[in-house]
């Protein structure tokens, strides 16, 4: 694995861990609870980051020049399904993360990847595998912030306080 790939794997792991702090210790009912004006929930965001990472790593693996965005799944992308649980989604993400780590061990980050077309992007574009993986990182990081706000509204917990507590500091 290159130094760059190693750094990306490390940053992905750190951001996943950061996101997972926001769902630590919550029930499935809490995961489905809206706490802000938005429709977002902790469970919905967890579902999305798992789905997003799986999707984009598959886009890299498939290199499908005819791929189209699956509009049928768009409506449920940010929803924790009736049969899903926080524990199940976390276990699923662990598998997805391991698969991503394994792929990054040999992935040429300069590989040109065809992006699925979509109604908002009808022309095929190409981007590097690096850009695609960095998109996954951006999604996890951005949604960790959303999740932190939702969690703080749910029960007052937040990532910064958790880090401080785990480091033996008061905040």
Image (cartoon, rainbow, N blue to C red):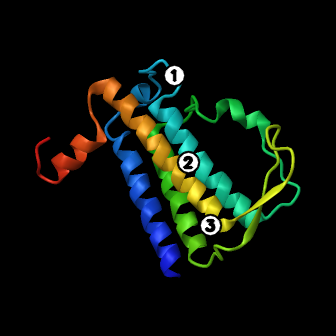
Q: Residues within 10 Å of mark 2 (few under 14, many from 20)?
A: many
Could you tell me which residue is drawn at 26 percent across and 28 percent down? 156
Q: Look at 44% across and 22% down and name the residue there.
A: 33
The Cα–Cα distance between marks 1 and 2, rounded to whole angstroms, is 20 Å
Q: On the image, numbered disc 3 is attached to which residue?
A: 130
First-in-chain label (3 vs 2): 2
In the rendered structure, are the residues bearing label 3 and label 2 in contact, judged by CB atoms less than 8 Å apart?
A: no
Q: Secondary structure at mark 2?
A: helix
Q: Would you say 81 lies left or right of 18 here?
A: right
Q: For residue 50, which numbered disc appears in the image?
A: 2
Picture quadrant of residue 103 = bottom right
The one nearer the camera, 38 or 120, is 120
Cα separation between marks 3 and 2:
19 Å
Q: Nearer the viewer, residue 95 or 109?
A: 109
Name the spot of residue 62 as percent of width and height, x first.
77, 64
Q: Residue 155, relative to residue 134: is it above or below?
A: above
**Could you say where residue 113 lies in the image, as x and y percent from the top left?**
75, 64
157 with respect to 96 (left or right) = left
Label 1 belongs to which residue?
Answer: 38
């Amino acid at each position: 694995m290159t130094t760059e790939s190693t750094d990306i794997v490390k940053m992905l792991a750190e951001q996943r861990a950061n996101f997972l702090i926001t769902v630590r210790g919550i029930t499935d009912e809490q995961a489905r609870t809206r706490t802000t004006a938005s429709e977002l929930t902790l469970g919905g965001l967890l579902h999305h980051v798992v789905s997003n990472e799986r999707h984009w790593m598959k886009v890299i693996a498939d290199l499908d020049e005819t791929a189209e965005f699956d509009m049928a799944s768009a409506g449920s992308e940010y929803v924790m399904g009736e049969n899903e649980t926080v524990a199940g989604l976390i276990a699923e993400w662990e598998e997805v993360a391991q698969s991503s780590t394994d792929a990054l061990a040999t992935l040429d980050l300069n590989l040109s990847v065809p992006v699925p077309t979509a109604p908002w992007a009808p022309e095929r574009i190409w981007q590097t595998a690096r850009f695609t993986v960095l998109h996954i990182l951006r999604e996890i990081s951005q949604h960790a912030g959303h999740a932190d706000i939702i969690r703080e509204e749910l029960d007052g917990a937040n990532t910064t306080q958790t880090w401080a507590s785990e480091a033996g500091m008061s905040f």
